[in-house]
Amino acid sequence: MFRDLRNIVSKELKELLRDPKILIGMIVVPLVMFPIIGLVIRGSMESTQQRLQRLEVGLLNFDKGSIAEDLTEFLSTYIIVKAINASSVEEAGEIMQSETNATDLIVIPSGFSENVSVEAEAFIDVYSIFSGTGGFAETASSSAVAGYLEYYKRQRAPDPFQTVSKSIIKGKPTDVPPSMLFTIMYSQVFALPVTISVLLIFSMQIAATSVASEKEEKTLETLLSLPISRFTILSGKLIGSIIVAAVGAVAIIVGLNYYMGSFMLMGDIVGSVDLAAVGLAPTLVGYLVLGASVFMALLSALALAIIISAFADDVRGAQSIVGYLYTVIMLPMLVIMFADFNSLPLAAKIVLLAIPYTHPMLAAQASLTGDYLTAILGVGYLILFTIALLYIAAKLFSTEKILTVKLKLRGLRLRRKTRSPREV
């Protein structure tokens, strides 16, 4: 029994390891993908550290007292403090975004120095400008500012004042602490890219298996020999792909709606946070942009799977070839999950933006933050990419190449096998 089992296992290993496509997917892809992800995340962390070394904050001082001036002088020894001349927090936030690189605003209220002097209750408000990227840099600056204020407080006994963390969302001040927003956005940054990636991968598997199974069972030859135009056959497959893409896009939108609803409920329980009131609930425009981005990404993925499946002789070969593309899908997913896209080096941004499947993940962020420009440009890029793939697919179906084209790696392996007996 054990000998038979050993023989079966040996046979399966030889068959699997004999195929170069499987070896590439098992060895080459991980050796390439994970170092690239590591380099991107390292670049993001280095960028964040450099940002903290030249940290810049805005200061809105309504007090002008001695302790407020002492606090300002203390902070200036560690970070860059920009005095903001404004009559309100909202006006100060607009000035900061247009005239400075500050990411946080310290507001010292009137009467602060007097209250501290008599050891009465005193507060300082620290507003963090919320960008919605969900990366480490999103809270790094606010944590650093809070650390400097805490260090200043330790110089006095008892603690002279309390620090209240707040946020500025889309130019509007809100009492929601940045830590809570970060938790919500970080969960969104984890869940949506994973959902989109899984949807793309499963859709490509289904499309590739559909064409490859027809080639393996010889039904594709029969289909192409029927008195039906090749354009009609391709159109039928593409319409089926469009239906799958549409259903997938709707599923993403519906899922996002329930997903965000769960966070709205969580916000009500934790801190009475109404995401719609603070401008973080997806709007109709956000849903439309996200839906269009996901739809075009799915359609392009399905068209690409149809093209690639033409290079396979059977279902197993098609799935093996399509597996090479999983790296292209998973790379932007992992980068966006663990790094702040805005803080990445320019070269890394260009590479990620060149990958079509990065854009629906960025559109998912834009649906909440309202920054639609990059998402709309991404939809345009996906449309051009999809048109190019559809043109290639049409060329394949217009000739007999759909039946005869083969992957070179497999051809090289077959030639080696047929050459060796003559050499013997």
Image: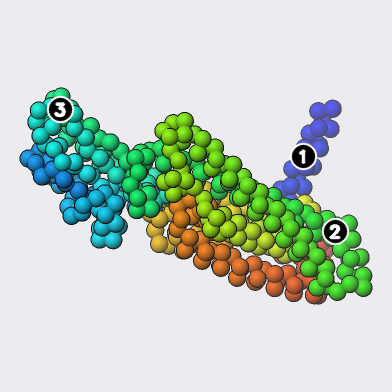
Residue assigned mark 2: 214
Residue 315 percent location from the top left of the image: 79, 53
How far apart in space, not on screen, are marks 2 and 3 (Cα)?
80 Å
Q: Earlier in the sequence, mark 2 or mark 3?
A: 3
Say which of marks 1 and 3 sits in front.
3
Q: Name the secondary structure under disc 1.
A: helix
The crowding category of the residue bearing disc 1, from other C-alpha atoms within 10 Å (few below 14, some 14 to 19, many at least 20), is few
Which label is found at residue 10?
1
Residue 274: quadrant of the picture: top left
First along the sequence among labels 2 and 1: 1
**Residue 141: % across, % down:** 30, 45
Who's the residue at 46% across and 43% down the image?
Answer: 275
* Among the two numbered marks 1 and 3 on one chain, the one whose residue lies closer to the N terminus: 1
Q: Quadrant of residue 126?
A: top left
Binning the other alpha carbons within 10 Å of mark 2 as few (below 14), some (14 to 19) or many (20 upward) gives: some
* Residue 304 appearing in the image: yes
Q: The residue under label 2 is which amino acid type?
A: Glu
Residue 406's spot in the image, x, y percent? 76, 65
Residue at the location (39% across, 58% down)? 345
Query: Marks 1 and 3, how far apart in space?
Result: 80 Å
Q: Amino acid at mark 1?
A: Ser
Quadrant, the N terminus: top right
